[in-house]
Amino acid sequence: MIEVLVEERCVECNLCVKVCPLNVFEKRENQPPVIARQSDCQTCYMCELYCPAKALYVAADAEDTVDVSADEIIETGLIGSYRKDIGWGKGYKSTASQDTAYKFYLK
Amino acid sequence: MSLEFDHSYKLANQNYDVSLKADVLVIGGGPAGTWAALTATENGASVILVDKGYCGSSGATAPSGNGVWYIPEDQRGEAMKSREALGGYLSERKWMERVLQRTFENVNRLDEWGYPFPIDEHGVKHKRSLQGPEYMRLMRRKLNKAKIKILDHSPALELLYDGYGIAGAAGVQTQENNQTWAVQANSIVIASGGCAFLSKALGCNVLTGDGYLFASEAGADLSGMEFSNAYAITPKYSSITKTAFYEWASFTYEDGSIIEGAGSKRGRSVIAKKLSEGQKVFAQLDKAQNDHDLQKYMRIAQPNFFLQFDRMGINPFEDRFEVTLRFEGTVRGTGGIRITDETCATSVPGLFAAGDAATRELICGGFTGGGSYNAAWAISSGYWSGEAAAKYALTYNRNNHDRTLTRKQVVGINEHHTPGETLGGNELTKLVQAEVTPYNVNLFRAEEKLTSSLLTLNNLWKEAKSHLGEKDSDLVRVRESAAMLATSRWMYSAALQRTETRGMHKRLDFPKTDDHQQRRLITSGLDEIQVNWDSHSLVNI
Ligand SMILES: Cc1cc2nc3c(=O)[nH]c(=O)nc-3n(C[C@H](O)[C@H](O)[C@H](O)COP(=O)(O)OP(=O)(O)OC[C@H]3O[C@@H](n4cnc5c(N)ncnc54)[C@H](O)[C@@H]3O)c2cc1C
Ligand code: SF4
Ligand code: SF4
């Protein structure tokens, strides 16, 4: 489930509000959005992928909330790491262009 | 009347905050819906697409990605043959051929549009895999370029009618305080995906069978609803129901001893059996343990498969981790709205169905499991339905007539309510899940348990008709629960009728395949459900 929104990193673009299929976030005036409906989260990681500021972290547990230390995931670089894996954002290249799936299909 | 009942009341009274018109309305913005919308536009129609979530990130494909049935012409014979037995010979070559051809052409168009297909060290481009986020972001950009109007966070909740038949749909906008909307259209494509019963399988919690319900309320029928019991391996508590790499797994008991016969494909029922006995099941991708190149390829091919492990602190090649089977219903099943001809028309004029909302039996028969056919079906059926919906809309253009939109009475949208007695959407959802999720009812099927579950579900339908209603602005949940309830009843009604084992439908009391049942099952009706054998024989097709 979505666990962390680091307000200091957030650039208030509200992309997470827009792309979350389950409408988990709530937009606010001149402030970062909030995680308003956490229990609706389907753990699809799309918000984290679209977030341009590495301000979001989705934990792997889809059923329960878990304790996540913001400092720790920032330090280990786990926060926003999905965006890097997919290769989105400035300075990265979409990893779809290196998709190795064919190695399996042609096996 | 308290405020919180306003949305239902407003829909019931056709009091819409937003009213729009288009030639074609597409419900759902996954691959099927986006291909339908684009193709309808290319055929000269004006199009509005509504999505419950966000077109581009919502649905089963966006977060997961798809292997695609993209096969060069000279290999297609073999590709088709390899499917037929698995699907219990309920597919048709004619359909497989046209889907293979359509998919080939459309995937080549994705290439032209700039999808970054990988090129190998010999300079060969590979187009059999689509990364979900990339693919769906591209599709959205194409829709924007084509100036197709997209309403995000705008679930359709019911269809609308005029003197000629279906004439549009109505729903709410969840990010605008549930304000009501109505779209008037000449034809409609239902592309709202399958039904995974809110199990939190990857990307599937927007997929609650809404389109099946709308189609049925309009008078259409369904096909193959017995093929609706897919379960996917996933690390316990995780949502990542991607199963391809469990081919490299061994499955063990808690004490580390091997579970005989357990596997990711045929051995999945062995895992289910252990789980239903209350045993813990563990997996480890140990067969890839020493192949570091392979591990690297795996990571790039399926980034979020590894994301989950990274976040759980597990090395899946070195560590054993507990697994479970998550229910995916019809999403990786094959049942859905029945298609009556090559245009993906339903039995209701002007109403078309595409993708997981439509039956996939035509190409998959009674089994899909993982991989490629679903994506090909979404692309092809989306294309055909969009083309036909545009032609229909432009031929029977009723926009010059005075069209009064009317509605039908449907379960869960009520003008009046008795607050104390109201059955809420979340409550009903839990009751439905309790009947459809257990392996020992839905996976290991037998008459006694199916009958008793169906009785419970039928009684729930009666209760829903009188008591299901909005509580705390949960109208979307209400209609979703109604759709899941209807889906569960079609599923078990068809499962009881098919007294044999075929495709993914396994009856403990009828473990053999019965040649006389090599036919499709058509399900129809809401209050009374009818299940009939299709007259169309599939023997020797
Ligand atoms: C984990 C996973 C992996 C998969 N891998 C593969 C694979 O490798 N190869 C393959 O071929 N297939 C695969 N599939 C199946 C494939 O993803 C689906 O067949 C495909 O997404 C179907 O496309 P669709 O457009 O019909 O539905 P979806 O992609 O599910 O989209 C449906 C859309 O409809 C919207 N919607 C739902 N209800 C409403 C409503 N009431 N009003 C408005 N909008 C609504 C949803 O928000 C969603 O955007 C996989 C599925 C899963 C779950
Ligand atoms: S996407 Fe990221 S940066 Fe944008 S509003 Fe959400 S959290 Fe903030
Ligand atoms: S993980 Fe998916 S469902 Fe959860 S908040 Fe992010 S986008 Fe929404």
Image: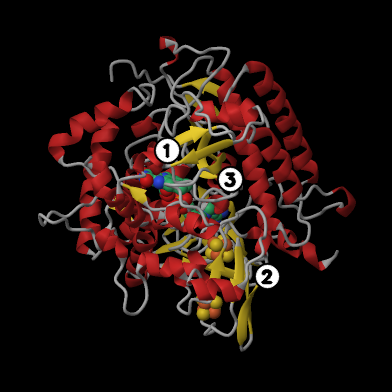
Task: Compute the Cα span from label 2 to label 1.
Answer: 38 Å
Q: Quadrant of the C terminus of chain B?
A: top left
In front of the other: B92 or B82: B82
The residue under label 3 is B236
Where's residue B538, x and y in %? 35, 19
Mark 2 within 8 Å of ligand 3, using the beta carbon: no
| Pointers 2 and 3 in contact (C-beta within 8 Å) | no
Q: In terms of sequence position, does the residue under pointer 3 or pointer 1 come before the other?
A: 3
Q: Chain of mark 3?
A: B
Task: Compute the Cα span from label 2 to label 3.
Answer: 25 Å
Instruction: Give a yes or no on whether discs 2 and 3 share a subunit.
Output: no
* Label 1 Cα neighbours within 10 Å, binned few <14 / some 14-19 / many ≥20: many
The residue under label 1 is B249
Where's residue B346, x and y in %? 44, 39
Instruction: Give a yes or no on whether discs 3 and 1 share a subunit.
Output: yes
As drawn, which residue projects farthest toward the right?
B420
In front of the other: B109 or A28: A28
Secondary structure beneath label 2: loop
Residue ID at (87%, 51%): B418
The residue under label 2 is A36
